[in-house]
Image: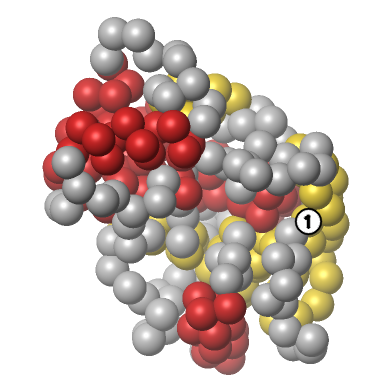
């Protein structure tokens, strides 16, 4: 799947007649970050099933079609503390919908790059940045074996499973050791290291992601010690 094809798919979805149903994308304000509007699915599982049926093949899980707690907290933190990004180069790792990248752009970052290996996520960042009238560059490469070329690295909900955390955490440490400022937004899905990160802020974030019972999650913004 190329990013060009994924972008064409999402643009058709956004403009298709009947948009707004539970299996369609809608442009909505983010609950905890209403300054940012995103194209989201009311029911991402239904959207995924319909798109796979139309494509006749498997598609990656549409994590970008929901707004996740870690990204909401991190985006809120950047907008409330624009001095963290003003005039700086920002890399949003595992950008998903692009929420954190868009918040960084709105807060005055000089350059923002949103990275995600899912072509649909790269496409979602493109359409969401357009909807918010900000400039965000996109990158679909796997960056985890290198070092970020940025002043600030932000990662919202990037530790959602053990296998991914085992790659992301050394990457974050390596970037921090090279002088990159690192901020992580995490609702503690069980993969935070016992040491090495310190608390910057904590937020009660409305839950909008699928299959979560609690209406609010306590989310931490952390940085390497």
Q: Residue 60: where, in percent of width, then height?
A: 34, 53
Q: Is residue 56 left or right of residue 77?
A: left
Asked whether 9 or 148 is in front, the reply is 9
Other-residue count near label 1 (Cα within 10 Å), few / some / many at <14 / 14–19 / ≥20: many
Question: Residue visible at 33% across and 73% down?
Answer: 142
Asked whether 56 or 10 is in front, the reply is 56
Label 1: which secondary element: strand
Q: Is residue 60 above or below residue 8?
A: below
According to the image, label 1 marks what residue? Answer: 219
Question: Residue visible at 65% across and 66% down?
Answer: 184
Question: Residue visible at 43% across and 25% down?
Answer: 23
The answer, for residue 36, to whether it is visible in the render is yes
Asked whether 75 or 19 is in front, the reply is 19
Where, by quadrant of the figure, is residue 182 drawn? bottom right
Where, by quadrant of the figure, is residue 200 drawn? bottom right
Q: Residue 6: where, in percent of width, then height?
A: 22, 42
């Amino acid at each position: 799947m190329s990013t060009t094809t994924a972008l064409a798919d999402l643009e058709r979805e956004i403009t298709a007649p009947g948009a707004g149903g539970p299996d369609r994308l809608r442009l909505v304000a983010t609950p905890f970050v209403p300054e940012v509007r995103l194209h989201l699915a009311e029911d991402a599982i239904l959207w995924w099933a319909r798109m796979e049926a139309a494509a006749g093949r498997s598609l990656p899980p549409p994590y970008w079609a929901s707004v996740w707690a870690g990204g909401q907290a991190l985006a809120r933190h950047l907008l409330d503390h624009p001095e963290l990004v003003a005039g700086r180069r920002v890399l949003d790792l595992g950008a998903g919908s692009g929420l954190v990248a868009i918040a960084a752009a709105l807060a005055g970052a000089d350059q923002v790059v949103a990275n995600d290996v899912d072509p649909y996520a790269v496409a979602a960042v493109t359409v969401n940045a357009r909807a918010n009238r900000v400039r965000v560059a996109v990158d679909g490469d796997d960056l985890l074996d290198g070092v970020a070329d940025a002043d600030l690295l932000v990662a919202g909900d990037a530790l959602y499973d053990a296998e991914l955390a085992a790659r992301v955490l050394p990457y974050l440490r390596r970037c921090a050791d090279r002088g990159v400022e690192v901020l992580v937004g995490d609702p503690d899905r069980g993969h935070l290291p016992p040491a090495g990160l310190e608390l910057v802020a904590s937020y009660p974030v409305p839950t909008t992601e699928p299959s979560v019972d609690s209406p609010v999650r306590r989310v931490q913004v952390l940085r390497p010690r």
